[in-house]
Amino acid sequence: MGTRPTLNPLIRPKPICLSFLFLLGITGRASNRDCLSPTARHCSLAFFGLLGVALFIMSTAAASDGQILRQSFKTSDGVRLSFLESGAEHASNGSITIAFITGWSMPASLWQKQLAELGRTYHALALDPRGQGESEVAASGYTAERRATDIDEFLRPFTKVLLIGWSLGALESLQYIQMFGPERLAGLALVDSSVGEEPSPGAGSEGAFVKELRQDRQRALGGFIHAIFKTRQSEADLEKMIHGAQQMTLDNSIALLSYPFPRTHWKQIAHGFTKPLLYVVTPQFEAQAHNLQKTRAHTQIEVFRSAGHALFVDEPDRFNGLIENFAKSLP
């Protein structure tokens, strides 16, 4: 895996659901400087020099507080993957790194409010999987095994990770554990995805969506993306997501929805994971959450009854508090 250079702060013309732009207006005016004596002028220059240093320190602290950077690395098969990073100053103090894996066709920028808030205390990262967000649209690699390998290479620099996977990202996080083991992980959070418990999702729903994608991809994606939020999103942001979801080929996007594993595959991985597990769901997976809690000891569950599938966007404060408390509880 390639090196990860420090790049310029992420510039987002129109962030989803959150503005990270802070205006700091500082004015100072010295009148009649030409009338100052040499000693007074020297003192004045010293004063303003110290003031400048102080303001520089203050502005640097403000900039680093929740600042989000965009970084990238190359995978072992030569694909450039992009990710967002905040709280890099916490990376070397032995604390947990929080890593977010987004869902099908969605960008890492959906985690903006998590990166901004949790980055104040933790090193936080959000991956754009291949073909999504700002990552390279590779010609191949749209399998559970390759995407899990991408996660492994993404996490290799870290040894104490809270891995958070949403939707398809939850399944790919489980596949990562199955292939590479849980050694790097301090804990795991699975967000609004089936984990193989009963009851199974509605029969035929996935096949119907794939059929809609093949018939009219733009319309199918528009319906899907509008439906994952309960809170109002700007039409410009929604259109950007719809456009971004079409970067990869139609066949590759459908391949991501068609991993060739039985439901028991995911259940066995979840049950075999012996470290702390948090399962965060909306009502569609509430029954699965209660069954997982019954059959897997020490599973923590949380139900967001008023949120959409992208529950961390709809209720960011509640979600961030939940993740922060879970992170604090990890050994």
Image (spheres, grey):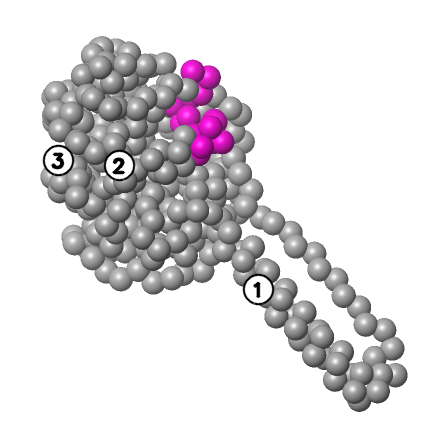
Kind of residue indicated by mark 3 = Gln
Cα gap from disc 2 to disc 3, whole angstroms: 15 Å
User: Would you identify the image quadrant in which residue 37 lies?
Assistant: bottom right
Q: Residue furthest bottom?
A: 38
Q: What percent of the width, then of the height, locates residue 210?
A: 25, 22
Cα gap from disc 1 to disc 2, whole angstroms: 35 Å
Kind of residue indicated by mark 1 = Ile
User: Residue 252's mark?
Assistant: none
Mark 3, residue position: 178
218 up-or-down from 4: above or below: above
Please tell me whether residue 317 belongs to the stretch shown in magenta: yes
Q: Secondary structure at mark 2?
A: strand
Relative side of 216 to 239, left or right: left
266 and 138: which is toward the camera: 266
Cα gap from disc 3 to disc 1, whole angstroms: 46 Å
Q: Residues within 10 Å of mark 3 (few under 14, many from 20)?
A: some
User: Residue 57's mark?
Assistant: 1
Q: Secondary structure at mark 1?
A: helix
Q: What percent of the width, then of the height, locates residue 42?
A: 74, 84
Please tell me whether residue 253 belongs to the stretch shown in magenta: no
Name the residue: 78% across, 83% down.
Answer: 41
Mark 2, residue position: 187
Kind of residue indicated by mark 2 = Gly
User: Would you identify the image quadrant in which residue 223 lies?
Assistant: top left
Q: Are marks 1 and 2 in contact (CB under 8 Å)?
A: no
Q: Nearer the viewer, mark 2 or mark 3?
A: 2
* Magenta-tinted stretch: 305-321
Q: Residues within 10 Å of mark 1 (few under 14, many from 20)?
A: few
